[in-house]
Image: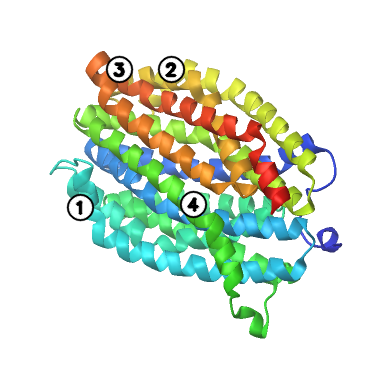
Amino acid sequence: MELNKKEKITDMTRGPVFSQMAGFALPVLFGMLCQRLYNFADTYIVGHFLGDEALAAVSIAGTATYMLFSIIMGVTTGVGVVVSQFYGAQKEDEVRKSFVAGGYVAAAMAFVITAAGMLTTHPLLGLLRTSKELMPMAAAYLLVIYAGSSATMLYNFSAAVLRALGNSLVPLLFLILSSVINIFLDVAFIAWIPMGTAGAAFATILAQLISGALCVWYTFRLLPFLKVKGKEWKPEPHLVREVLRYGIPTGLQMSIISVSDMTLQAVINTYGTVMIVAYGVCMKVEGLGFQLADAVGSAVGTFTGQNIGAGDYGRVKKGVRSAYLLNLLCYGIFCPVVFLLAEPIMRAFTQTPEAVSLGAEYMRIFTAFFLAGGILVVYHNILRASGDVSVTVLMGLSEVVTRIGCAFLLPRIFGYQGLWFVSPITWTCAALVGGIRYYSGAWEKRQRAG
């Protein structure tokens, strides 16, 4: 296929592995950092203008939204895997048909998420043991996020297709623009127009709508390769099933992990507002750290999908080794910086001494385990992109069992400090499950047999 020479897409089935993966991962990373930065902007602006209680409410609501993003990421991951495999196999028509099938699946799931999310907002916050004082603010934020789930799906779907074709730069550029707009809207909807926590949610949704619309515009205007005409708009059932075959297990795996996250959040909530604020800020920093892993994982997923399509399994293994090195380089910088700057980071979001002390304590613990989290993401992406999706669900289940078990057990033994080791232990155990499966070679045998 010669299209990659004139289209803004990349064939990852040939060329130097490490530099190709690093070149793909960097724009993805910068894009994710932009998303994280405007999440930080939400946190900072909410805390600065509305106070610690509003900050705690947004933190709780943020945990609840992970279930939403789990489903969205599952669907868009399924689309990305299918598109990348057909692109690697040089099947142009199937790429375009997969794009259409994925679009229908994404639209249907966005509708379901909106309806289900808005109906279950208050019961979900109740399960998280949200206090009466924080409930109205958390619910206001969460309802807006659920109502705007179509905007979130739009960006993630279009970005997933572009990345599956090796284009990680364009989603980044549009995301940078929307991040700047998001920060401006945060100030406008919170400081100038007193919308409270709902204002922060409105700012996020509008920013995602802008970046998603720009990605779609680029796809249809500047990528003729993906232009759909006439009867091609009718989805082919076998491709819908293929998208769901990858997307449902991924969404399920991420959703069950979100259940364990919410369980940990519920335990945290019993310790009061100061603990919630400390944990909420730490989650922002932890999320920032995982952007490194997710960027490398995105590169692994696209690289694996294209090379599985091309039948080059040896090159897939080289990609995994390159991912190990990329993780080592990233966390070799990130973890020492966070360890040393833990207290200043906390003070940027809250001036409550107890919250600063608790948050700094947790940051210095989880930085020691971040590499395990990065390797875990590598295994999720290599196994998923190679079609070994049932194992990723098993890895998700191992995270649920470990996190929930540790969330209730460790505080009984070590007090509140036991909570700081729940996630690190969970990452390590799940990474071991993924590593055993990867090195067993079962994923390769499955592909060769299929």
> In this rendering, which labeled residue sits more in front, label 4 or label 2?
4
Q: Are marks 1 and 2 in contact (CB under 8 Å)?
A: no
> Alpha-carbon distance for marks 3 and 2?
12 Å
Q: CA distance from mark 3 to mark 4?
A: 34 Å
Work out whether residue 186 or residue 301 is closer to the camera in this orientation and state it.
301
Who's the residue at 77% across and 65% down the image? 91
- The vertical placement of 299 against 399, above or below, is below
Mark 3 or 4 closer to N-term? 4
Residue 102 visible somewhere in the drawing: yes
Q: Secondary structure at mark 2?
A: helix
| Quarter in which the N terminus is drawn | bottom right
Residue 239 location, x and y as percent? Answer: 61, 68
How far is mark 1 from mark 3, CA to CA?
29 Å
Cβ atoms under marks 3 and 4 closer than 8 Å: no
Q: Is residue 111 above or below residue 334?
A: below
Choose the circle earlier in sequence order: 1 or 3.
Answer: 1
Which residue position is annotated with label 4? 249
Ranked by sequence position, the earlier of labels 1 and 2 is 1
Nearer the N terminus, badge 3 or badge 2? 2
**Image quarter in which the C terminus is found:** bottom right
57 shown above or below 225: above
**Label 1 sits on residue:** 123
Residue 134: x %, y % from top left: 19, 43
- Circle 3 is placed at which residue position? 417
Residue occupying the far left of the picture: 132
Is there any visible trace of residue 156 in the rendered image? no
Between 362 and 393, the one lying in front of the other is 393
Q: Residue furthest front?
A: 449
Residue 176 picture location, percent across and down? 58, 49
- Label 4 sits on a secondary structure element that is helix
Q: Which mark is residue 364?
A: 2
Front tag of 1 and 2: 1
